[in-house]
Amino acid sequence: MTARPLNATAASLLGFLHEEPMSGWDLVATAQSRIGDFWSLTQSQVYRELAAMAADGLVEAQERGRRDRRPYAITDAGREAFAEWVAREPDPETIRFPLLLTVMFGRHVPAERLAAIVAKHRQTHADRLATYERMDAALPPGAAEAEPYAIATLRFGIAYERAMLGWFDALPPTIAGPVSS
Amino acid sequence: MTARPLNATAASLLGFLHEEPMSGWDLVATAQSRIGDFWSLTQSQVYRELAAMAADGLVEAQERGRRDRRPYAITDAGREAFAEWVAREPDPETIRFPLLLTVMFGRHVPAERLAAIVAKHRQTHADRLATYERMDAALPPGAAEAEPYAIATLRFGIAYERAMLGWFDALPPTIAGPVSS
DNA sequence: TGGTACATGTAACATGTTACATGATTAG
DNA sequence: CTAATCATGTAACATGTTACATGTACCA
């Protein structure tokens, strides 16, 4: 019941629980598909946060259902804590980009190896961009009005991945290898 | 001395120690200024990793200098461990972007509050972009050949921040508020 | 001589990751 | 009946954060 400050992961779970009671399993799947691209979390974490939030009275375990699933419902205290959290100034983003370390220390990497690494990552980003663009193209008409928030996050992904590709394509041959086109 | 696998933070310290022996203090400053934009670390962590790497024989503490500073030098084992690490496939990046959570759950945020948050973050990114662009413009001629790696990471920052601004400017009024221009 | 910047280090805790153990239900 | 999938949970550990305690040297 103590008023420990919410962390972003726990708060997100509360966010999803506004829609309907869900089990840990459901929450993992929901979170990974809806915010996974900019807020990763694991199963362990979800069960941990649910247990902590239950202890704090922010969620309530419901009857076990099929296959032992244990849905949690958000409580009034949970709604209140979430409302407070979501209106707060969000922390600045953190980007941890190991590839950039490889590039930064590129002079210690054999040239072909570096080029291969870069090429592989470029491909990953190209694939992701294609996925996002397909999702964007598949949006039904009227979606922009109906769910502007989810669309904005999708557009973030598109903007980000396009920027990545632009960056890859502007890398000098020292890093990306001899021009292959 | 055990061959525990290097983590990216420790490896980066080794990367910088290739240039010259440095103390924990120096390493914090160096890392924050040279990789801080895509790989954050704290003082605590640096001292912890240095102690661990010293125990593993990857670095060696030197004589204490002025003001009790204790420089560390990389060892041959350290160079070897680094070379192996840096040529490995880097892990995918992780982005943790709390603002996107705020946006995703935007329907729970009062409209003016959401717009204010978004505007403030836009400004932060605009400032950062301006800084990066100033740095880029200030590069001496020939820098592209002399230090392509550091420049590539700077260009990453520019590409990223431009994408962010583009994204902010394309947000619908529901999120960014009534057009102010 | 007192404040500020330099410098090291520890402690306590929060968060994130990986691996495992266990059991329920369903599909073939 | 059995393999696959659904589902919960714990344990152990790695990493990241915040706060504090201590001491050194410079400079106004």
Image (spheres, coloured by chain):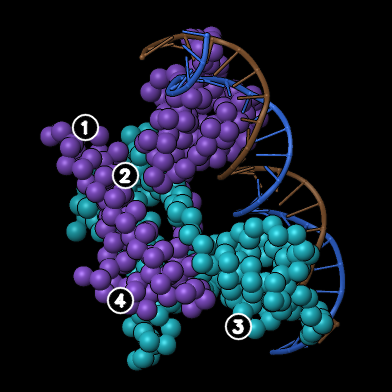
Chain colours: A cyan, B purple, C blue, D brown
Residue B159's place in the image compared with D12, above or below, is below
Contact between labelled residues 4 and 3, with CB atoms less than 8 Å apart: no
Work out whether residue C6 or residue A46 is closer to the camera in this orientation and state it.
C6
Q: Quadrant of residue C22?
A: bottom right
According to the picture, the residue beneath numbered tag 1 turns out to be: B146
Distance CA(mark 3)–CA(mark 4): 28 Å
According to the picture, the residue beneath numbered tag 2 turns out to be: B153
Which chain's residue wears label 2? Answer: B
Residue A19 marker:
3
Q: Count neighbours of disc 1 (C-alpha within 10 A) and say few if under 14, some if 14 to 19, many if 20 or more.
A: few
Which chain's residue wears label 1? Answer: B
Contact between labelled residues 2 and 1, with CB atoms less than 8 Å apart: no
Q: Nearer the viewer, mark 4 or mark 1?
A: 4
Distance CA(mark 1)–CA(mark 2): 14 Å
Q: Count neighbours of disc 2 (C-alpha within 10 A) and say few if under 14, some if 14 to 19, many if 20 or more.
A: many
Of mark 4 and mark 2, the one earlier in the sequence is 2
Residue found at x 69% / y 76%: A76
Do pointers 4 and 2 mark residues of a single chain? yes
- Describe the element under mark 3 as helix, strand or loop: loop
According to the picture, the residue beneath numbered tag 4 turns out to be: B178
Residue A53: x %, y % from top left = 72, 65
- Describe the element under mark 1 as helix, strand or loop: helix
Residue type of the residue flagged with mark 4: Pro
Residue type of the residue flagged with mark 3: Glu
Which chain's residue wears label 4? Answer: B
Instruction: Name the quarter where the N terminus of chain B is drawn.
Output: top right
Judged left or right of residue C17, residue A143 is left
Residue type of the residue flagged with mark 2: Thr
Work out whether residue B157 or residue A126 is closer to the camera in this orientation and state it.
B157
Q: Nearer the viewer, mark 1 or mark 2?
A: 2
Of mark 4 and mark 1, the one earlier in the sequence is 1
Residue D15's place in the image compared with A23, above or below, is above
